[in-house]
Amino acid sequence: MSVERPVHPVSIVMIEDDEGHARLIERNIRRAGVNNEIVPFQDGTSALSYLLGPDGSGEASARRHLLILLDLNLPDMTGLDILEKVKANPHTRRSPVVVLTTTDDSREIQRCYDLGANVYITKPVNYEGFANAIRQLGLFFSVMEVPQNP
Amino acid sequence: MIHTGYNPALVALSIGLAIFASYSALDLGARIRGPSTGPRWAWVAGSALAMGGGIWSMHFVGMLAFDMGMAAAYDLGLTLLSLLIAVVVTGLAFTWVAYRGEGLASILVAGPLMGLGVAAMHYTGMAALRIPGDLAYDPAIVAVSVAIAVSAATIALWLAFRNHGVGQKLLAAVIMGLAVAGMHYTGMAAATFTAEAEGAPHAHIAMLAPGQQNLALSVAGATFFILFLAMLGASLDQQRIQRDLQASEARFRAAVQAVRGVLWTNDATGRMIGEQPGWSAMTGQTRDQYQGYGWAEVVHPEDARATLDAWNETVRARRTFIHEHRVRMVDGQWRHFAIRAIPVLEASGEIREWVGVHTDITEQREAEAELRESNQEIQRYAYIVSHDLRAPLVNVMGFTSELEATRHEVRAALTGHPQAERIDTDFGEALSFIKSAVNRMEGLIAAILKLSREGRRQFRPERLDMTALIQHLADAHRHQAEAARAVVTITPDLPSIVADRLAIEQIFGNLLDNAIKYLDPARPGQVMVTAQSAGPRGICFSVTDNGRGIAERDHARVFELFRRSGAQDRPGEGIGLAHVKALVRSFGGRIEIRSQLGVGTTFSVTLPRGASTAVDQVSKPAPLEAA
């Protein structure tokens, strides 16, 4: 999409504590032909500080085009905390959030959608499924419109 | 018409006789249905003899006290008949009470019967009178005399069987005695004696010939002696009852100490009254503090409201009280108690008091809480472990696949190299071992995760038609069954149970699956599902096959996670039975195996009929023993 719409460079914020998973996700997104910048974070605190700014106001994300890939199991907080803060902040709430996690607990899934998650994907354990899912996600990203944050 | 008169001393003696006889008879009569030794008929006979004999001697002494102004003689046959009538009719009345109970309806039959017996005796006795003159009756006064006998006898019987105090029994005896004597003297008033024409009237003062007086005294004396013997028998019996009562009180006290509980009593309206030594020692409350509903002060504030509501409801409904709450001990500590109280009933069916026991179950509750906690911990642990194990596994799997891609690149790069073939083979072998190990591990983790999820799932109990449910499962396995040439037979009309549908489907689905999977190819397979009652609350379902069987040393092992038995020639992970066992146990049921190698296997699952919630047991209130 960066090719078609260079005016709005969309950044993919990837919050994933497992380095291996992060690398595998990145590789497969690239394989789908997505060349956007990927900003990786391994813990919730640093991710929130990037998204909402050090002051937590969210000003930092104003006018950014962000797409957030979120894992729920983080060392310092759960992904739900981040989801809640992102969707409650006027500057970040328009950013699409894709929850990508190992949990397939139905209550957890409902919770995420209730909090405003846009997509919930369970990481398939077998690698073929995993790689396939990420590649399709990449294809989905390439046709997706990401609005600018207010 | 001739003048008649009474000897006042003998009249008094006759009335005394009647009262004394009534007391003996009613005392003996009350033992008919009491806890006395000996057969009932013996007490009935004793009562009848005392009553009948008493009535008869009262009558006889009364007749001797009567001076009818002419020579009188008695027909022996009719006199004896009158005694017999008195004994037999009162005997019938006592028998009626003995076998029909002491209810009002029964007394309304026995009382009039006894009254009529008294009257029949009197008028038969009068008929035995041989006098040189005529005897005529005024029918109205006769009727009054019978009415007196009937009503007084009924009241006396009613009193005698209602009350057990000596005073009340005495009152009943006086009424009964007056019934007999009153009937007699009223009956006498109904009679008019007319001397025969030339019969010379003698002096009419109430003077008895010495012979007549002696006869009266002998009759009275003999009667008193008989009644005295009856009273002696009754008092010996009373002593024995007293001893039994003391023994049972001692046993009761010992039981109270033995039950590791605290005993208390409340009055009929549910208020604590009187001395409660056990309660005082346990809670430190004084009598003033626990009286009425004061005991609720030391019940834990969170439990007090519910306890009072449950208690008042129980007192209203006259049920057995079963409850649990925490109580503050004298040292300030809270302890957990199970309470059970029953109403003690009077013979009349009214509640006399409540007797309850507080049993300390603190240790039990703590152990249960600990067990529950450790169970939850294991489940959490299993969940976390399986989750966290999954994450690195994705990496191992992912990068192995990446290596696979790299392997092709390496092979291409090494084209022409002498060792190219060997390197590629080594590469491939290593990768395939890693992949198969990861696949295996993934299966195990999935299994642990599934088990831990099952443990956390909330059951939704519903009534299940077991025949339909198992038929449905069998239909789902039809393909495998046909492939194994197996027939699945389900007993029609399996009893229904209340349980979680999914869990029951998983239990029997696994058992059917195993039965079909491990059939012996050497013979046509037969799988049978049957059920039988297991105690009042359970049903035992059995899944029986004629398959290859399980060796005895593996009977316990097959229920363990990841363990399998026999030839490993069928696909499976060794999860099914572990899962089944966990489910059965979470229902409060049990599973057993009977199997013989080469013959077949039966898995028996015993499940509660209903949802396994505690059912409020309602037992009958304990009636107070008549003492």
Image (tube, coloured by chain):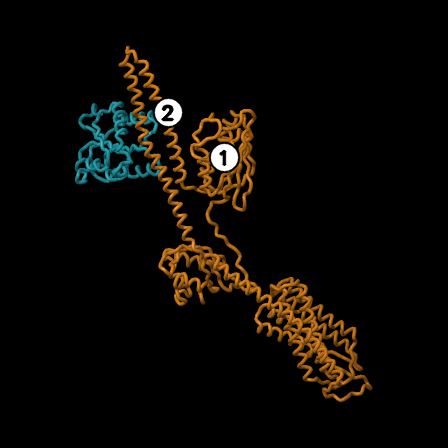
Chain colours: A cyan, B orange
Three-letter amino acid code at disc 1? His
Q: Chain of mark 2?
A: B
Name the secondary structure under disc 2. helix
Q: Residue at x 28, y 14 (%)?
A: B412
Nearer to me, B257 or B157 = B257
- Which residue is tagged 2? B436
Name the side, left or right, on which A52 lies relative to B59: left
Task: Count how many numbered circles sit on residues in the image.
Answer: 2
x and y, in percent, of residue A103 in the image = 33, 34
- For disc 1, the neighbor class at 10 Å (few under 14, some 14 to 19, many from 20) is some
Marks 1 & 2, CB-CB < 8 Å contact: no
Q: Which mark is residue B555?
A: 1
Q: Is residue B529 above or below residue B113?
A: above
x and y, in percent, of residue B378 in the image = 37, 40
x and y, in percent, of residue B514 in the image = 49, 31
Q: Chain of mark 1?
A: B
> Which corner quadrant holds the N terminus of chain A?
top left
Name the secondary structure under disc 1. loop
Report the residue that reaches farthest toward the front.
B553
Tag in front: 1 or 2 = 1
Q: Quadrant location of residue A42?
A: top left
> Which corner quadrant holds the C terminus of chain A?
top left
Q: Is residue B138 visible?
A: no
Question: Closer to the N terminus: mark 1 or mark 2?
Answer: 2
Name the side, left or right, on which B348 lies relative to B232: left
Q: Residue at x 29, y 32 (%)?
A: A100
Report the residue that reaches farthest toward the right.
B198
Q: Which mark is residue B84?
A: none
Do discs 1 and 2 share a chain? yes
Three-letter amino acid code at disc 2? Ser
Q: Is residue B617 visible?
A: yes
